[in-house]
Image (cartoon, rainbow, N blue to C red):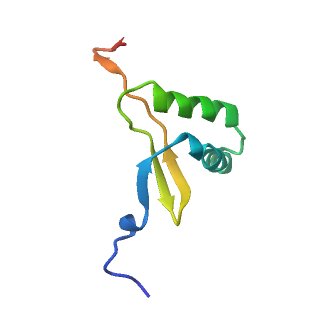
Amino acid sequence: MQDFDTAPRDQVLVRNVQLKDIDAIVSIDTATTGRRRHQFLEKKLSQALTDTGIAVSLGAELDDHLVGFMLARVYYGEFGVVLP
């Protein structure tokens, strides 16, 4: 039976990723790429969480399990020139 009071997008929690999410991130990435890239993803996750003052990396959580993620970093500057 369809629950018409809850939109599908409201069933998934979108939150900031955390270092503790690394195993789930590696599992999702491995299922997608067919390659296990734990060291690479651990480095990218660490950079995404520490190299910027703006948190933009997100994780999608369903039933208390990470089911998707996006890693990103924000750089300051303009016209292609990155500022510290």
Foreground: 53 or 38?
A: 53
Q: Residue drawn at (61%, 35%), measured in percent from left and top?
A: 41
Q: Residue drawn at (38%, 82%), measured in percent from left and top?
A: 3
Question: Which residue is the extreme one toward the bottom?
Answer: 1
Identify the image quadrant of residue 26. Answer: top right
Q: Residue drawn at (72%, 40%), measured in percent from left and top?
A: 36
Q: Residue drawn at (62%, 34%), measured in percent from left and top?
A: 42
Image coordinates of residue 84 in percent, x first then y, are: 37, 13
Query: The N terminus lies in which quarter of the figure?
Result: bottom left
Question: Which residue is the extreme one toward the left?
Answer: 78
Figure check: 20 above or below 50:
below
**Is 26 on the left-hand or right-hand side of 70?**
right
Image coordinates of residue 70 in percent, x first then y, are: 48, 43
Figure check: 15 above or below 5:
above
**Is 49 on the left-hand or right-hand side of 35?**
left
Q: How many marks?
A: 0
Figure check: 61 above or below 69:
below
Figure check: 60 above or below 20:
below
Image coordinates of residue 16 in percent, x first then y, are: 43, 45
**Is 56 on the left-hand or right-hand side of 67?**
left
Image coordinates of residue 37 in percent, x first then y, are: 69, 36
